[in-house]
Amino acid sequence: MSTSNLISSLTTIQKQLILYVCPLWLIFGTVGCLFNLIVFSRRPLRSSSCCIYFFAASVGHLVTLSVGLGSLLHSLNNPDPQTQSLLFCKIRGYLFQISIILSRWFIAFACIDRFASTSMNIRLRNFAKPKIAYRIIPIIILIWSIICIHRLIFYEIKGTLCGIVNNIGAAFYHTAYVIFAVGLFPTITMSTCAYYIRQNLALRQQRRMQLVLGNAHHNSLDQQVLRMLFVQIICYVIFTLPQMGNLIFSTISVTITNRSAEYLAIEKFVLFLAELMLYLFGVTTFYLYTLTSRTFRSELMKLFHCHRHCCKHRIMPAIIDSIINTPVHN
């Protein structure tokens, strides 16, 4: 296959994936994230500090889907703004990176929160409170907004590729930072906390430190939140592995001088596929929550019932008023 044919084939495949896959993921992901925000803002779930982190993570997922998939869909029938405007290339990459990292670290802190809540140490349990979560979330946002700023400095455009292209030092730093900040550290944090959470729960059971009947509902909510957390950890690892492999590949490729147009096309296509997998973490959260938590499903159904009830009460007075005010003709 000639170079021009290969580049044309990869471009066609990418456009087909954007045309048929991205709209579905954007619709289901956006709707799911919006439902997450509504349900987690309801009183029964808002009382859990872990659910506050879930709420913040859903905001991050929503930004990731909007910034990432929105620009991809725009490039279908228009020139790709990432390769046309250096400013857009930098800002889009910066916002995309921040939202992805924040959503991951909010889940990681949700794991830390659950570890603290199941601990035998009273001081550690005090960490798992809503007021602590409200303080930690802005700190996490500030820290990662500063750490990610290198994308605004070193991103550039080369051909059809928007990224760190020629600066080997920046490319190595970016790879190490993403591998550790997005891949290893959150995964290690989540896995370690999951292990100790199970240990703490087993220790509670052995010592017969079960909650009293008055807190039975809260205990049930805690168990459901843990299930939601464990499922997210598994999905996070699965959806992040391709990106880690792609980063290693991209870093090695930077050391190769005079890369051909064919090589750059393959690199861009692999980057696209890895990025496409990253979106799945945000797309699937609502459906994972719905499947794993009875309380989440219950609050979701209450939301729908409340909407139907409100609509009914709005429609009926309007009908009655129209009947009353209709003139009677003799």
Image (tube, rainbow, N blue to C red):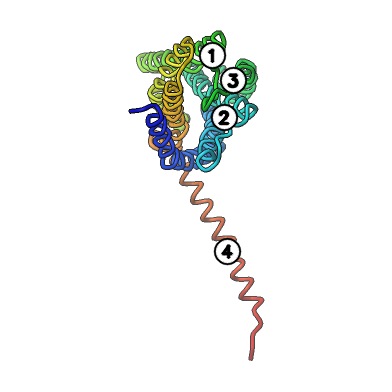
The Cα–Cα distance between marks 4 and 3, rounded to whole angstroms, is 55 Å
Q: Is residue 43 visible?
A: no
User: Which mark is in front, 4 or 3?
Assistant: 3
Residue corresponding to mark 1: 174
First along the sequence among labels 1 and 2: 2
Which element is circle 4 on? Answer: helix
Question: What numbered label is drawn on residue 315?
Answer: 4
Q: Is residue 301 visible?
A: yes
Viewer-side residue, 165 vs 325: 165
Query: Looking at the image, do the residues carrying marks 1 and 2 touch, with CB atoms under 8 Å apart?
Result: no
The Cα–Cα distance between marks 2 and 4, rounded to whole angstroms, is 51 Å
As displayed, is residue 322 above or below residue 117?
below
Query: Looking at the image, do the residues carrying marks 1 and 4 touch, with CB atoms under 8 Å apart?
Result: no
The Cα–Cα distance between marks 1 and 2, rounded to whole angstroms, is 20 Å
Q: Residue drawn at (48%, 11%), measured in percent from left and top? A: 257
The amino acid type of the residue labelled 3 equals Tyr
Residue that sits furthest to the left in the current view:
1
Viewer-side residue, 269 vs 141: 269
- For disc 3, the neighbor class at 10 Å (few under 14, some 14 to 19, many from 20) is many
User: Which mark is in front, 3 or 2?
Assistant: 2
Q: Residue drawn at (41%, 39%), measured in percent from left and top? A: 16
The amino acid type of the residue labelled 2 equals Thr
Q: Where is residue 206 shown, x and y percent of the image? A: 35, 14
First along the sequence among labels 1 and 4: 1
Residue corresponding to mark 2: 83
User: Which mark is in front, 1 or 2?
Assistant: 2
The amino acid type of the residue labelled 1 equals His
Q: Where is residue 83 shown, x and y percent of the image? A: 57, 29
- For disc 2, the neighbor class at 10 Å (few under 14, some 14 to 19, many from 20) is some
Query: Looking at the image, do the residues carrying marks 3 and 2 touch, with CB atoms under 8 Å apart?
Result: no
